[in-house]
Amino acid sequence: MTTENYDAKLGEIWELRLYTAGQTPKSLTALANLQRICDEHLRGKYRIEVIDLMANPRLAKDHQIVAIPTLVRKLPEPLRRVIGDLSDTERALVGLELRRAT
Amino acid sequence: MKTEDLLRESENLLTAVANGEVDAFVIGRDDNRRVLLLANAYQRYRQLVERMQQGAVTLSGDSRVLYANQRFADMVGMPLSQLYTIALDSLVSVADRARIGTFLLISARDSRMELDLRRRDGTAIPVVLSHAAVSDGYTTLLVSDQRPLQWPALAGDALDSIRIALEHLNRSPGLDPQAREALESISEQINALARMSEEMVDVQRPPPHVSASGG
């Protein structure tokens, strides 16, 4: 991503969807980590939607979810997926394109 | 999706799995998807179930025990290892067997049934069974022991022992006046606790004007 694109994306409202499996430890950890990352990097410019696939597994079809937890960046486009509990902040930031891979 | 993106996501998935960052997978296709939890995802619930004061038992379609917690094993007086695959029928009286069969057929969440569990030593304990969950042909029941609480009486016995020990100490010759004062203060508090314990035991007894038949 170019510097211009990167800055432009930070000006948009980010729509994030976290796919969880009820209240498993990894799902809860992912939600806590996501909240922290958003507070630090997207202050006030994000929306988080949590989809519990235990309650409705069919919703996994929407974003081709295979492992849980998975975070999907719906907006800004293009769609991005980050798999895992987001405890590796560096990997999560790179996956969300909030930081360029080094 | 571009090949580059596919490769990045595949690497992402492998890294997450290798790092132990996921605890569930989605299997199946289209509308037949299911979520499979890894064992560690269950751990917290398992600890909760193992430590709770109610019995919990999961039955197969033919009413055999597939899983039971330690509390349930204690209720029926059997080691857990001998409980698996045993028929629930064998743990209740002959008279209750038809009732429990009907109860399991109802499979309604929150439905309840009172019966006596037969312990291995031949004694029986009154319990209430309630449906906790029914899924994939398995039924999970919660089992509540209906015997009066024993702990107030046990606490009363323990407090009596402490009181006797304190009185003995208080009679010791040459006891420092400050120590004697402290002992008397402790004795007063023990007496107050003993009175509370007796009141709790009384609360559990039926009022004298209620007949045994409950009429």
Image: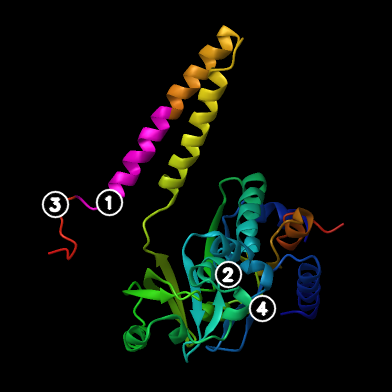
Q: Is residue B133 left or right of residue A88?
A: left
Q: Which amino acid does label 3 sit on?
A: His
Name the secondary structure under disc 2. loop
Viewer-closest of B2 and A27: A27
Q: Which of labels 2 and 1 is toward the front?
A: 1
What separation in Å lies between label 4 and label 1 (alpha carbons)?
Answer: 57 Å
Q: From what the image shows, is residue B160 above or below residue B7?
A: above
Name the secondary structure under disc 1. loop
Query: Where does label 4 land, which residue?
Result: A66
Classified by dominant secondary structure, the portion drawn in magenta counts as: helix
What separation in Å lies between label 2 and label 3 (alpha carbons)?
Answer: 54 Å
Q: In this view, does A88 lie to the left or right of B71?
A: right
Residue at (36, 56) in percent of width and height: B148
Residue stretch in magenta: B191-207
Disc 4 + disc 2, Cβ < 8 Å: no
Q: Position of residue B16 (x, y in %)?
A: 76, 68
What separation in Å lies between label 2 and label 1 (alpha carbons)?
Answer: 46 Å
Q: Which amino acid does label 4 sit on?
A: Val
What residue occupies the far bottom of the structure in this picture? Answer: B62
For label 1, the crowd category at 10 Å Cα-Cα, with few meaning under 14, some 14 to 19 and many 20 or more, is few
Share a chain, discs 3 and 4?
no
Q: For residue A82, what is the image quadrant?
A: bottom right
Q: Which of labels 4 and 1 is toward the front?
A: 1
- Color scheme of the displayed model: rainbow
For label 4, the crowd category at 10 Å Cα-Cα, with few meaning under 14, some 14 to 19 and many 20 or more, is some
Viewer-closest of A26 and A31: A26
Disc 2 + disc 3, Cβ < 8 Å: no
The chain ID associated with circle 1 is B
Query: Where does label 2 land, which residue?
Result: A21
Q: Which amino acid does label 1 sit on?
A: Arg
Query: Where does label 1 land, which residue?
Result: B205
Q: Where is residue A5 in the image (x, y as percent from the top left)?
A: 72, 58
